[in-house]
Image (spheres, helix red, strand yellow):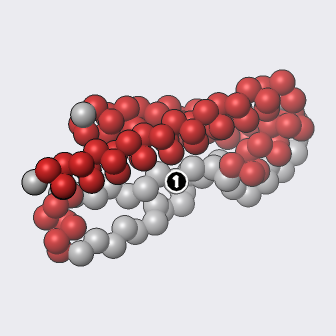
Amino acid sequence: RKKLLMKELKKVCGEAETTLKDKGAELHAELLKRGQQPPVGLVVTDVAPPRVEVTAAQQRQLGQVPPPPVLPSLAVLMQQSRLAHPSSSQQLSSCVSRWQQEIRWLQGELRGTTTTLDNAL
């Protein structure tokens, strides 16, 4: 169950990351085509991901910890999307809400499963 939940969580997060990066790049290109200066935070390319500090015990438990993804600013992305394409902005907003709900639910289920396993052992 835990592996299934983790797999689903990775799938949802991957879908969200890909969509946000693609939308940011799409809006960035569109603004450049119009001759407008895109706002900072719309596309993140040369920014190094934040370092993740883990203890030796966490490292043994988790293995190699990948850095968190660097994504475009959601506020900037939504603002530019509303200006450029109001209908696609609404769709993106509903997708973001759905991802947030799915991620919260999956994290809650994972916590519950982990607690159940810990209590069983």
Along the line of sight, the residue nearer the viewer: 64 or 36: 64
Q: Report which residue position mark 1 lands on.
A: 70
Residue at 74% over, 26% down: 91
Residue at 82% over, 45% down: 79
Along the line of sight, the residue nearer the viewer: 12 or 22: 12
Q: Position of residue 35 (x, y in %)?
A: 87, 41
Residue 88 appears in the picture as rendered: yes
Q: Quadrant of residue 21?
A: top right
Say which quadrant the N terminus sits in. Answer: top left
Q: Residue at the far left: name it.
A: 121
Residue 33 appears in the picture as rendered: no
Q: Which amino acid lies under the numbered mark 1 shown in the image of this protein?
A: Val
The reply, left or right, for residue 58 in relation to residue 102 is left
Disc 1 element: loop
Say which quadrant the C terminus sits in. Answer: bottom left
Along the line of sight, the residue nearer the viewer: 1 or 24: 1
Q: Quadrant of residue 34?
A: top right
Q: Position of residue 117 (x, y in %)?
A: 19, 49
Q: Position of residue 63 (x, y in %)?
A: 18, 57
Along the line of sight, the residue nearer the viewer: 97 or 51: 97
